[in-house]
Amino acid sequence: MQLLPDDPRFPIQLKSIPDPPKMLNYLGCCTPEIFRFCVALVGTRNITPYGYNVITKFIRELSNYDCTIVSGFSRGVDIAVHEACLKNDVSTIAIL
């Protein structure tokens, strides 16, 4: 589905940057609430077992808060973040 800047669900943070995207494509639930409290997590594409454990524990702790985790959709840390979010019922946004 597509989201245009004049849509009330379009993230206000993106509207305020100098060159905002002309549209967003999304799959899943897209409500203004999902953008209210976002935490961005990024990292290496070559995640170590230690890194995987840290991500898992960190996301488990964040599941106690009403936040959305934003990350890329690349192999390594990004995928580990999204997997941990899904396992812990934490909202997640993958930026391609």
Image: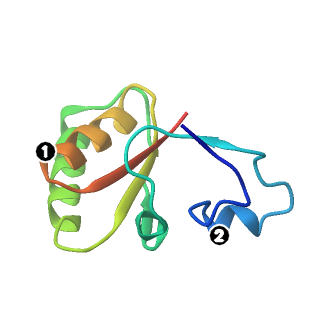
Residue plotted at (28% across, 73% down):
66
Query: In this view of the protein, which residue sits in the foreground, 78 or 67?
Result: 67
Image vertical order of residue 9 relative to residue 50, above or below: below
The image quarter in which residue 69 lies: bottom left
Q: Position of residue 20 (x, y in %)?
A: 78, 54
Q: Amino acid under label 2?
A: Ile
Q: CA distance from mark 1 to mark 2?
A: 29 Å
Disc 2 is placed on an element classified as: helix
Please tell me whether mark 1 sits on a helix, a strand or a loop.
helix
| Residue on which the image places disc 1 | 87
Three-letter code for the amino acid on which mark 1 is drawn: Lys
Mark 1 vs mark 2, foreground winner is: 2
57 relative position to 77: left or right: left
User: Residue 90 in the image: x percent, y percent?
Assistant: 24, 56
Q: Residues within 10 Å of mark 1 (few under 14, many from 20)?
A: few
* Residue occupying the point 54% across, 37% down: 1
Position of 56 with respect to 81 (left or right) is: left
Marks 1 and 2, the one that precedes in the sequence: 2
Q: Quadrant of the C terminus?
A: top right
Q: What residue sits 36% from the left and 29% below the top?
A: 76
Residue sitting at the far right: 18
Location of residue 52 by image quarter: top left
Q: Which label is found at residue 46?
A: none
**In-front residue for pair 3/80:** 3
Q: Mark 2 Cα within 10 Å, few/some/many (few <14, many 20+)?
A: few
Type of colouring: rainbow
Q: Which residue is mark 2?
A: 12
Residue 42 visible here: no
Number of disc labels: 2
Q: Residue 73's spot in the image, x, y percent?
A: 45, 32
Asked whether residue 39 is in view, the answer is: yes
